[in-house]
Amino acid sequence: MLRAKPVFVLSAAFIGAIVVAATLPLGGRAQTPAQQQPPPPTPTFRTEVNYIRVDAYPTRNGAPIPDLTRDDFQIFENGQPQQIDQFERVVVKAAGPQESRVEPNTVAESRAMAESSRARVFVLFLDVYHVDAAAARKIRRPLIDALDRLIGQDDLIGVMTPEMSANDIAFARKTTTIEGILDRFWKWGERDTDLPVDPEDRKYGECYPNEPAISACADQNGVAAKMIDRRHEKRTLDALEDLVKYLRGVREERKAILALSNGWLRFKPDYSLMAPLACEGPPSAPSARVDPNSGKLTTKSTEQQAQSNACSIDRINLAQIDDDRLFKDIMDEANRANATFYPIDPRGLAVFDTPIVRTDVPGPPPPMTPPSVDQSMLRGRITSLRTLAESTDGLAIVDSNDLAGGLKRIVDDTSAYYLLGYYSSGKLDGKFHSISVKIKRPGVQVRARRGYLAATEAEAARATRIRNGDAPATTDAEALAVESVLSPLSAFSREATLRLRSAIGWTSDGRQEIWLVGELGTADAWRLGAESEITLSKDGETVATAHATVAPGGRAFRINMTPSHPLAAGEYSFDVRTTATSKLASSGDLLQLAVPASPSPVGSLLVRRGPFTGPKEMPTADLRFRRSEQLRVEVPIVSSTPSSSSSARLLDRNGKAMAVPITTANRDDADGSKWVTAQVPLTPLGPGDYIVEVMAGNTKTLTPIRIVQ
């Protein structure tokens, strides 16, 4: 839950100069008569750790107010009045032609652009689990039209789904890029699919199919549906929590999240779901039996027993989730991150919440949801969307068939704002400080950031030493780097159908090589193997393709792609389409690939060996490991790197070196590529997050891992 966010509360606002647009439209020229005086110079905001910036959105009857002055505003921190030091009105430049918008070439470049106070940052969150396919198609055109009006020349927008890590978000300026993503996911709504897309959902249906009312197993009717709904909501809310935590590190100014969703029921613990079922016993350990293949006694679980155990454990865990508490945590995190939600219900004016007949679980359809219960569920979902908007100073577009008009309200709401700066009189205590903004003019409503997380005295002292040149500025940079490296690990709290990992290198004769590792999930549908078709593209144009096969009983593949000519620097995408040999599962997955401007190797690949891989080593894209496993990290290097310059060490989650020896070696492969390998001992490590640092010449590669047991 996936991102360049700070370990400490010191954001880029505290350690870098921020230039704010003056009274001109952003990035444009003043459209005033020639005889008018030129606008005053754009001020530079302070960078001290106790200097706070606040973006405020005042409106009257829903319309922005353009003529407020500094004296019209009042700022309070923890109830105490603050002196406004600087004041500017920021007007967002209207969207121009697509071809005039400058796109970032890499994820890193897009994040650097996002730090500018002149740019607004938007994230389009597609809640695939809670939007019907028809509603997804219905919202597509109004959404694209609204984004064309909404996205200014300097603005950035990214797309995220519950299956993604926030760290994988790539921001763009051209709405044609976003339209391409929506075209790719034109059926992204999955709520009303007859056959569950997710193998885990299908597994629940197989474990707890609906039975005839006279069956001895009829008490399990509805169990699979409850588990599927709870799992979907938990994954979605986990992703939203991941997103707001990530956005906190992107920049201090406001970030807008356009969440397309039908809403959530905010499940609470349901102890009736934990009750024993007539046709299912408690999870059991493997018992001795005769292996039909060898004729020998074995204690290995049968697939049926293993799946039954897994379903039983999932049922108990899902019964205990408290999404209402998680929902409140998300709103708190959003306010800390200065992130505003604009929820949009693409159904428009909804009449019913649940389908008349639910067909995503095998067996006889369950009884229709009573109208009173259905209406209660519908109100609950809409209330969730409204609460999320109101608690984060946003707008909820719900209960309306005028989706285009609702999206226009969002455009108007974010078209202009005031940026204020003040020196905080509060303590440097590392705690959350609330902020409230008031307008002296009558009849004016204002929305502003709810607060910020203060620095500690130690962090403030370090920032002062850096600013005075008494300490290296890399102290905070390294902290940011460590947190950025560890952030993808949050995605591994959720299971995935397929995980992907890539690396780029160059051979001794100058050929560019790209490696991709894919690892399947543990669902039974993949046990007979799978086939993957892989496409590497940029801006919709295919630059390379490959095919990968996972053998029966296998879990992973590793392929390399050699483009016909070296790829230009920029952001590329892997599109991996995987089909199980059993035909019972399929998957479509994307992975962003940032190609550097020079022939410098990028990334690392991992190889595991342990009780679950047998005597063979297995390439892996899963960053979770057990202490009983062996891990090898492989880093591509340039051919001129001397073997004597290679080394590796293990860091804890704070970036401190640990006294765990790592053996390194250099390897030349038959394709002409060169590698540094690091053998990492896992036995002495406790559960937690770590970083494997590999040095090759002047190049440092950081690889996160998580020890789970």
Image: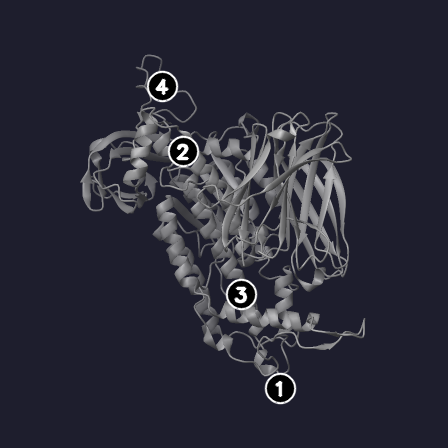
Residue 526 seen from this side? yes
Q: Which mark is residue 475?
A: 2
- Lateral position of residue 358 relative to residue 688, left or right: right
Residue under label 1 = 216
Q: CA distance from mark 1 to mark 2?
A: 65 Å
Crowding at mark 1 (Cα within 10 Å: few <14, some 14-19, many 20+):
few
Q: Nearer the viewer, mark 3 or mark 4?
A: 3
The quarter of the displayed image where residue 77 is located: top left
* First in residue order: circle 1 vs circle 4: 4
SS under mark 1: loop
Residue type (three-letter) at the residue carrying disc 1:
Ala
* First in residue order: circle 3 vs circle 4: 4
Residue drawn at the location 61% of the way across and 84% of the way down? 213
Q: Nearer the viewer, mark 4 or mark 2?
A: 2
The quarter of the displayed image where residue 572 is located: top right
Question: Marks 3 and 1: CB-CB under 8 Å?
Answer: no
Residue type (three-letter) at the residue carrying disc 3:
Asp
- Lateral position of residue 399 relative to residue 597, left or right: left
Q: Nearer the viewer, residue 7 or 388?
A: 7
Counting from the top left corner in percent of width and height, residue 70 is at 23, 31
Q: Nearer the viewer, residue 407 or 456?
A: 456
Residue type (three-letter) at the residue carrying disc 2:
Thr
* First in residue order: circle 3 vs circle 1: 1
Residue 394 seen from this side? no
Q: Which mark is residue 229?
A: 3
Residue under label 4 = 32
Q: CA distance from mark 4 to mark 2?
A: 47 Å
